[in-house]
Amino acid sequence: LDGGAAARPVAAVPRRRGFMPPPRPGAVEPVSDPTSDREPWAVLLPAEIHPAGPESIADVARFTRADEYPDRAAMFDDLARFDAVVLRSFSLGAEEIERATRLKTVARHGAGLDSVDVAAATEHGVLVSNTPGANAHAVAEGASAPALAARRRPPAAVAPVRAGGRDRAPFQSREARG
């Protein structure tokens, strides 16, 4: 906490209807929760997702991972039972969105919305969101590391070293700066 200030509980405010994250640690739970008598949301997740996401809403949602289906056709045939879909490696076109009669929201895990037919989602009242910039540092590292390695020409240097050579001069490069 900032400057050693004591933590204060969040005021007891009922959650809005629908899909809400669980209260933060230390928050006062509402006395009357209008979502408590509702069925948990059925959420379709990508095969790989950090567990913190699903864990943060586990009290209001039940999850199915895309890799639990034998193929994409089976997964798309089952779309009608989901309230929410988190996309990473597959697309939702107009046909799939029309088939997903309970669908309330589609979250694109990553930047861009090219994998979602936004017009069809809007037509069916489905909220579409994404997470631009969430992994920007990882993308920058992934792009920079090969470029830095290429300056050192490691493939060209391996053969002479394995042959017992010790002449480093042909493989030295200027250091990257800035």
Image (cartoon, helix red, strand yellow):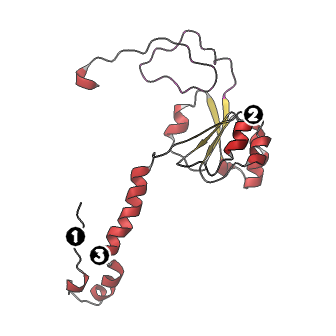
* Closer to the camera in the image, 106 or 54: 106
Q: Which mark is residue 175?
A: 1
Alpha-carbon neighbours of circle 3 within 10 Å: few (<14), some, or many (≥20)? some
**Given this view, does label 2 or label 1 mark the residue nearer the observer?**
1
Quadrant in which the N terminus is drawn: top left
Q: Position of residue 75 (x, y in %)?
A: 74, 49
Helix, strand or loop under label 2: loop
Alpha-carbon neighbours of circle 2 within 10 Å: few (<14), some, or many (≥20)? some
Q: Is residue 167 left or right of residue 52?
A: left
Residue annotated with mark 2: 102
**Residue 82, quarter of picture:** top right
Residues at marks 2 and 1, CA–CA distance in whole angstroms? 56 Å
Image height check: is 97 above or below 9?
below
User: What amino acid is at disc 3?
Assistant: Arg
Q: Is residue 146 left or right of residue 38?
A: left
Residue annotated with mark 3: 152
Q: Is residue 122 magenta?
A: no
Farthest-out residue, top: 31
Q: Position of residue 108 (x, y in %)?
A: 58, 45
Quadrant in which the C terminus is drawn: bottom left
Is the C-beta separation of discs 3 and 2 under 8 Å? Answer: no
Helix, strand or loop under label 1: loop
Image height check: is 1 above or below 44?
above
User: What amino acid is at disc 2?
Assistant: Arg
Helix, strand or loop under label 3: helix
Q: Which mark is residue 16?
A: none
Q: Is residue 31 magenta?
A: yes
Among the two numbered marks 2 and 1 on one chain, the one whose residue lies closer to the N terminus: 2
Q: Position of residue 80 (x, y in %)?
A: 77, 39
Alpha-carbon neighbours of circle 1 within 10 Å: few (<14), some, or many (≥20)? few
